[in-house]
Image (cartoon, helix red, strand yellow):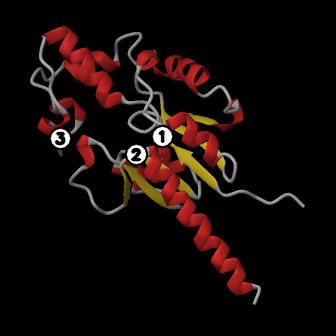
Amino acid sequence: MNEIKKTIGIDMDGVLADIEEQFMDWYEKEYGVRVPRSERLGVLEPEGFPEKGAIRTYVNTPGFFRTIPLMEGAVEAVKKLMEDYEVYIVSAAMEFPQCLSEKHEWLAEHFPFISWRNIIFCGDKSVVVTDYLIDDHCKNLDFCKGKAIMFDASHNVNQHHHVRVKSWTEILAFFEQEKSSEERLVNIETV
């Protein structure tokens, strides 16, 4: 009998893809100033840089989403999670014209082992139902019907109403603990 795996929804920007690094790199290239994470703590991305329209310009520029650096440890961690869970990539990809195709190409390059069936591009993540959702924005996590897991980012440091992880190493540790808790529960129920 095939066991039904629990599901994990994983955001792209700020979780798999290091969009903060991309913003800092593009801003520095254009304005010659690197605005460090420490100066943007608790501030949403568009307001975190001196030139207020810069971030909006970047996300509307062809190539921006296609060239975002990979978050450290993401590929290995996702592969590990796929051993025990059904993993879905859940990304808002409808707001910016080139975003959908660039995100698709980015995933094909960095996560070719994820089936097209497990990629969900949407506008509003509240319609996605998974057992777990890993995201960096409360606007997505607040509507999560499963367990919400907040991936640490400069813009969310002042938000404390979700489980917080600061790296892919911490995500793997979280899911190891979840697995151990479930195994203990099964052992108690079978006694």
Q: In the rendered image of this protein, does residue 83 appear above or below residue 15?
A: below
Circle 1 is placed at which residue position? 11
Q: Earlier in the sequence, mark 2 or mark 1?
A: 1
Q: In the rendered image of this protein, does residue 74 appear above or below residue 6?
A: above
Furthest toward the left, the residue is 50
Q: Earlier in the sequence, mark 1 or mark 3?
A: 1
Drawn side of residue 175 relative to residue 61, left or right: right
Location of residue 170 in the rendering, given as x and y in whole percent from the top left corner: 44, 52
Circle 2 is placed at which residue position? 167
Location of residue 128 in the rendering, given as x and y in whole percent from the top left corner: 56, 48
Query: How far apart are the alpha carbons under marks 2 and 3?
Result: 20 Å
Circle 3 is placed at which residue position? 43
Q: Earlier in the sequence, mark 2 or mark 3?
A: 3
Q: Secondary structure at mark 1?
A: loop
Question: Which residue occupies 23% across, 50% down?
Answer: 157
Drawn side of residue 57 relative to residue 51, left or right: right
Amino acid at circle 2: Ser
Q: Nearer the viewer, residue 99 or 39?
A: 39
User: Would residue 145 be visible to someone looking at this image?
Assistant: no
Mark 2: few, some, or many residues within 10 Å (few <14, many ≥20)? some
Q: Nearer the viewer, residue 2 or 141?
A: 2
Are the residues tagged 2 and 1 within 8 Å (C-beta)? no
Location of residue 175 in the rendering, given as x and y in whole percent from the top left corner: 55, 58
Amino acid at circle 1: Asp
